[in-house]
Amino acid sequence: MASEIKESDWKLFRQLLPVALERFCERVLAEVQAAVRDRSEGSHDRYLKLFDLVRERDKTIGRLFNDPRRSNALILLVNIKQQGLLTAEEFARFSPETRERVENIEDVRAPNSQ
């Protein structure tokens, strides 16, 4: 199938997926801590902001990590990369073909791509 990535890239993707998930969760927990510590607003307002933050990050985590299959790994990889959850060294470990496909998708998604 054209949308599937090579087997070696699929194995690497599955290896890096928990690493990216851990980074994402660390980021969200830092955001939660900052929201809770922010005393510029009342407790109820902070609670509402925290609730919205967690709800939005839950949507994002689903978009990044739910249902990892070889057939959708390329799109998940693009999403994870765009969130800054992979280092340049980690991304460089993918095959040139996969890196090029990811970069092409990023170019299409870029706001100034037209």
Image (cartoon, rainbow, N blue to C red):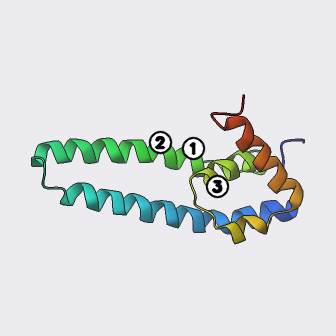
Q: Are marks 3 and 1 in contact (CB under 8 Å)?
A: no
Q: Is residue 95 above or below residue 50?
A: below
| Residue 109 found in image quarter | top right
Mark positioned earlier in the residue sequence (3 or 1): 1
Gap between marks 3 and 1 measured at Cα: 12 Å
Three-letter amino acid code of the residue under disc 1 = Arg
Task: From the top left corner, tell me how far across and down residue 86 is, in percent.
Answer: 63, 63
Mark positioned earlier in the residue sequence (3 or 2): 2
Residue 63 got which mark?
Answer: 1
**Residue depicted at x 71% and y 43%:** 106
Q: Is residue 5 visible?
A: no
The residue tagged with tag 1: helix, strand or loop? helix
Residue 59 got which mark?
Answer: 2
Q: Which is in the foreground here, disc 3 or disc 2?
A: 3
| Residue 30 found in image quarter | bottom left
**Residue depicted at x 73% and y 36%:** 108
The residue tagged with tag 2: helix, strand or loop? helix
Q: Is residue 95 visible?
A: yes
Dividing the image into 4 quarters, which one contains the C terminus? top right
Q: Residue furthest bottom?
A: 89
What residue would you read off at disc 3? 81
Three-letter amino acid code of the residue under disc 2 = Lys
Gap between marks 2 and 1 measured at Cα: 6 Å
Left or right: 51, with 83 as reference point: left
